[in-house]
Amino acid sequence: ASNATSPHDRSNDYEFAAQRLPWGVQLYEKSASAALQAGEYARAITLFKIAREKSVLTPAGQFELGKAYFLNGDQENAIVEWQTLPTDDPATVGAGPYLADAYHAQARFDDEERVLRQWLALDPTNVNAQYRLGLLLFADASPEAIPLLEIVAASDSPTLKLAAEGLR
């Protein structure tokens, strides 16, 4: 499957192998990941669910399942997947931006703030998370916003630096 030229082909190859190799059920997750990469979100969801049913879905796979739901327009199921990720797994950090976006789109700003704070607790130097939390707090006129935005303005990110300086 690793020699397949496209994510779609890789997904098909992994699924074919998973169906025929009883010891290779972890290939369902690989197939799902390739389907997600190919933009085949509904198929990815189905394959990730098969991996879960066979008890081989990893935290990274669960994160990707949430991403497939999110990209397929199902924010509620995406949120469920991301909220139930193990807190000590690196996949949880990856879920932060998506979960914050989902909460923001639903105007669930308290939840968005909680997720951004969790994201920063796991990745304290993440300028993107600092900027997003700073903006959210700035919109709420919180005094916590300015120190966060000052950190962003002093960062190496030219785009975020300009945006943060514009809010001063």
Image (cartoon, rainbow, N blue to C red):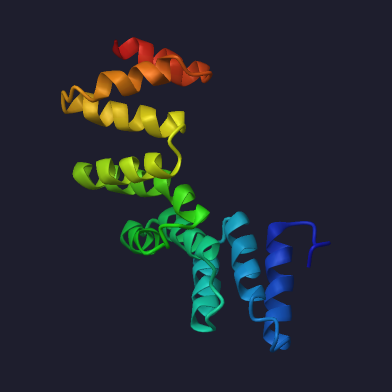
> Who's the residue at 79% across and 63% down the image?
2
Direction from residue 144 to residue 159 in the image, left or right: right
Residue 85 position within the rendered picture, expressed as x and y whole percent measured from the top left: 41, 62
Residue 131 position within the rendered picture, expressed as x and y whole percent measured from the top left: 37, 27
- For the C terminus, the image quarter is top left
Residue 67 position within the rendered picture, expressed as x and y whole percent measured from the top left: 47, 56
Direction from residue 136 to residue 34 in the image, left or right: right
Determine the image quadrant of residue 22: bottom right
Direction from residue 79 to residue 95 in the image, left or right: right
Q: Is residue 66 above or below residue 136?
A: below
> Who's the residue at 70% across and 86% down the image?
23
> Who's the residue at 79% across and 57% down the image?
5
Q: How many marks?
A: 0
Determine the image quadrant of residue 132: top left
> Who's the residue at 36% across and 64% down the image?
84
Q: Is residue 65 above or below residue 122?
A: below
Q: Is residue 82 above or below residue 53?
A: above
Q: Is residue 41 visible?
A: no
- Return the residue nearer the eye: 111 or 33: 111
- Please identify the residue farthest to the right as the structure is shown: 3
Q: Is residue 56 above or below residue 150?
A: below
Residue 104 position within the rendered picture, expressed as x and y whole percent measured from the top left: 28, 42
- Please identify the residue farthest to the left as the structure is shown: 141
- Return the residue nearer the eye: 103 or 83: 83
Q: Is residue 37 visible?
A: yes
- For the N terminus, the image quarter is bottom right
